[in-house]
Image: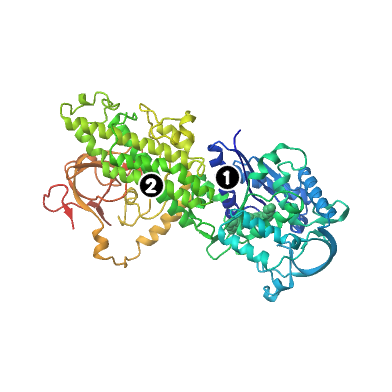
Amino acid sequence: MSKAYYVTTPIYYPSDRLHIGHALTTTMADTLARWKRMQGYDVFFLTGSDEHGLKIERKAREQGTTPQEYVDRIVATFKQLWQKLLISYDDFIRTTEERHIRVVQQIFQKIYDQGDIYKSEYEGWYCAQCEAFYTPTQVKEFEGGLCPDHGIPVEWIKEESYFFRLSRYADRLLQYIEDHPHFIQPESRRNEMVSFIKSGLEDLCVSRTTFDWGIPVPTDPKHVIYVWIDALTNYISALGYGSGDPKFEKFWPEAHHLVGKDIVRFHTVIWPIILMAAGIEPPKEVFGHGWLLVEGGKMSKTKGNVVDPMVLIDKYGVDAIRYFLLREMPYGEDGVYSEEALVRRTNTDLANDLGNLISRSLAMIERFAGGVVPEPGPEEEADRELRELAQSLPQAVDVALDRYEFAAALAAIWKLVARANKYIEDMAPWSLAKRAGAGGSAAGATGKGADNGAAAGTEDAAWARQRLNRVLYNLAETIRVVTVLASPFMPAMPDRVWPQLGIEGSPELASWESIQRWGALPPGTRVHRGEAVFPRIGEQGDAAVAEEQGAKNQLRQTAPKEGKRHKEHKEQLEKKEAARVTEPETELISIEEFARLDLRVAEVLAAEKVEKTDRLLKLRVRIGDEERTVVAGIAQYYRPEELVGKKVVVVANLKPATLRGITSQGMILAAVGDDGLSLVTPERNLASGAKVR
Ligand code: MSP
């Protein structure tokens, strides 16, 4: 029987639309659920909505509707968001559902019957937004009588209430925390909670009489059960607790609650005590992550800085948003969201590192192996390193995820991406191809008959063919492994990669088992290079694109963007960029910074227009004894035929960029003035490869 895994998000208040902070917890939980499912666990992933309370009742009244109608409308928007964010929940619990109400009443009654809940009178400061009472000690913090969270006045309220004797369970809880070191994570929050419990627990008010929108106390219905007993119980009501549903027995011992740091105390003090009092084991683990902040601190409606994940998904795509959330949050601590940071992450990690790895590798398989993944030649040291790194990853990522270290898990996968990009540079498949005499013919691509290739006869050519085949095979296999590992984080990505890698419809090659073994990708697989898997989003700095835009200032330009969803953002950036390029350049650079540029004389061997563009030319250039493809935005100034044989200056150490599906391996320098554009050429006839200093 497969192992069970139960993961939950907080149930969110339908008091408003959800923002990117809520998306963070839910994306984390979804990633864990997908990861465990991939490993063969029987997963139950729960999310939901926390629908009772004064705040909801008031909101509904303000809008002239009933609380039920109001929550129905907002909860529908939750579900739309989760669908768009590809949240694969197994159940969505609403606290207004009968199956939930029944369990809450049952738990309340049980605790009451055994004397842990008693009736008394409550007096205290109350914040209607928090729906929480504050003790006189806490109220000192509210300078001016304002709630620190919401900035609204707290009210002094006196009412008959039921109380839960939390203090009775303090020692048992401390013991539980000590015996279960993983119960509260990260450790800093565990320590915080231990001190909090040791400082003494006050009895908790668990019912209210000043509003109706809640679950009635079974034996005293003028009281409604105060929100935390109601809300927390969702985690077991959804499993059918008390109804004989086998889900409870199966999943509850494996419960992992993911929550923001704001509600760690409810989940690690109140919740385990409710459960202990009801004779149920506490959950296995509670992980409290930090806040996602925006410039200026917390998101709030009054500040007008609430970030809507729906808008971001439409603009940048679901993978980019999920990747950003998971990669950018430091473990257990607060992280900061900004659109610039999102664009930067997407462009560096996704478009440049992973996107280019995929497009370069597939382009080389097309060019040097007839578009077919070759039978690999013998393994050498560099191949072994790449393979060993790839083989160590499933476990490394697993360990990181078991500790909720999402950023570390992604960083581990990206180590392989970086290693593979470096492997391309080190192995220089284009040089191997030249030595092997391979120019795109499928002959020799399977490794058989390598000696019959264009450069047949020489031992060196046969060796180069074998090496080339091994390198190309390893690159394709790396793309497969990375895609499988990244799929729980970015579930939309495999659908774009598999058709290009030629293994669409082969789920066995996308499985957890298949990445335990290096070499599962069958040689002979035909690749189909298509659109960039991760298109760049507009941003300064990509030189090849600078050319595409008819460059005013070649080294400081806006990057390319393809697809509708980037259009608006592109326009904004273009405006910003246009404003910037007209400003005089005052920033000085050091000689060392200049020396980082590898400028070389190159000879243009061939030139042609790039289809469906007015501006782009694809040039084949020679730099010393290496040939490269460079895409340049000069078609409006030069005809292809007049360029052949010209000597130009190329930035040779620029990261490759993909333009219209063509990988550009450098940038050609041009000067731009009011009277047009001119390529920069050496004044004397120098050999290609000469360094420009
Ligand atoms: N209804 C309660 C939870 C009950 S769980 C039994 C509640 N709901 S909430 O709508 O306010 O959502 C709170 C949760 O949303 C946080 O604990 C956190 O998981 C997530 N976040 C809300 N804003 C957030 C950030 N700015 N950053 C990160 N997470 C945030 O509390």
The residue that mark 2 highlights is: 353
In the image, taking residue 636 as reference, residue 484 lies left or right, namely right
Q: Position of residue 495 (x, y in %)?
A: 48, 35
> Going 22% across and 53% down the picture, which residue do you hit?
599
Looking at the image, is mark 1 or mark 2 nearer the viewer? 1
Hey, what amino acid is under mark 1?
Asp
Answer left or right for 423 relative to 187: left
Residue at image point 29% right, 51% down: 654
Number of numbered callouts drawn: 2
Q: Mark 1 and mark 2: span between their CA atoms? A: 25 Å
Q: Nearer the viewer, residue 158 or 371?
A: 158
Reading the image, the residue beneath label 1 is 30
Q: Nearer the viewer, residue 497 or 166?
A: 166
Secondary structure beneath dot 1 equals: helix
Neighbor class of circle 2 (other Cα within 10 Å; few <14, some 14-19, many 20+) is many
Counting from the top left corner in percent of width and height, residue 210 is at 83, 61
Q: Quadrant of ligand 1?
A: bottom right
Question: Quadrant location of the N terminus?
Answer: top right
Q: Position of residue 477 (x, y in %)?
A: 38, 35
At label 1, counting other C-alpha atoms closer than 10 Å, the crowd grade (few under 14, some 14-19, many 20 or more) is many
